[in-house]
Amino acid sequence: MGSLDRIHADRVLGEAIATRADPLHLTVLFDLSPATATKYAQLARPLLHYPVVYSLGDHR
């Protein structure tokens, strides 16, 4: 998988998370097949339950 493919996959997964794992939205936005959009939605669903914590270092 090339770097452009990884960027695209990351973008699709990010959109899946942002839209609460809606496969129809992914199908329309990214012109994905329903099967592919469903796979991304299935990958995103468990991530919806865990907050993302960013650490930018210790700023005391």
Image (spheres, rainbow, N blue to C red):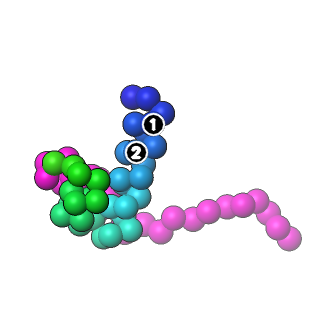
Tell me, yes or no, whether the highlighted magenta stretch contains residue 48: yes
Left or right, 22 with reference to 55: left
User: Does residue 1 sit above or below 13 in this rendering?
Assistant: above
Spatial CA distance of label 1 from label 2 is: 6 Å
User: Does residue 24 sit above or below 10 in this rendering?
Assistant: below
Q: Residue at x 38, y 68 (%)?
A: 18
Provide residue 31's location: percent of width, then percent of height: 23, 51
- Extent of the magenta region: 34-60
Q: Are marks 1 and 2 in contact (CB under 8 Å)?
A: yes
Q: Which residue is mark 2?
A: 8
Left or right, 39 with reference to 54: left
Amino acid type of the residue tagged 1 in the rendering: Leu
Q: Based on the displayed image, in which of its 4 quarters is residue 26 positioned?
A: bottom left
Q: Residue at x 28, y 59 (%)?
A: 29
User: Does residue 38 sit above or below 60 in this rendering?
Assistant: above
Q: Which residue is mark 1?
A: 4
Q: Residues within 10 Å of mark 2 (few under 14, many from 20)?
A: few
In the picture, which quadrant includes the C terminus?
A: bottom right
Q: Residues within 10 Å of mark 1 (few under 14, many from 20)?
A: few
Q: Based on the displayed image, in which of its 4 quarters is residue 24 positioned?
A: bottom left
User: Number of callouts in the render?
Assistant: 2
**Camera sees residue 42:** no
Q: Residue at x 82, y 67 (%)?
A: 59
Provide residue 11's location: percent of width, then percent of height: 41, 52
In the picture, which quadrant includes the N terminus?
A: top left
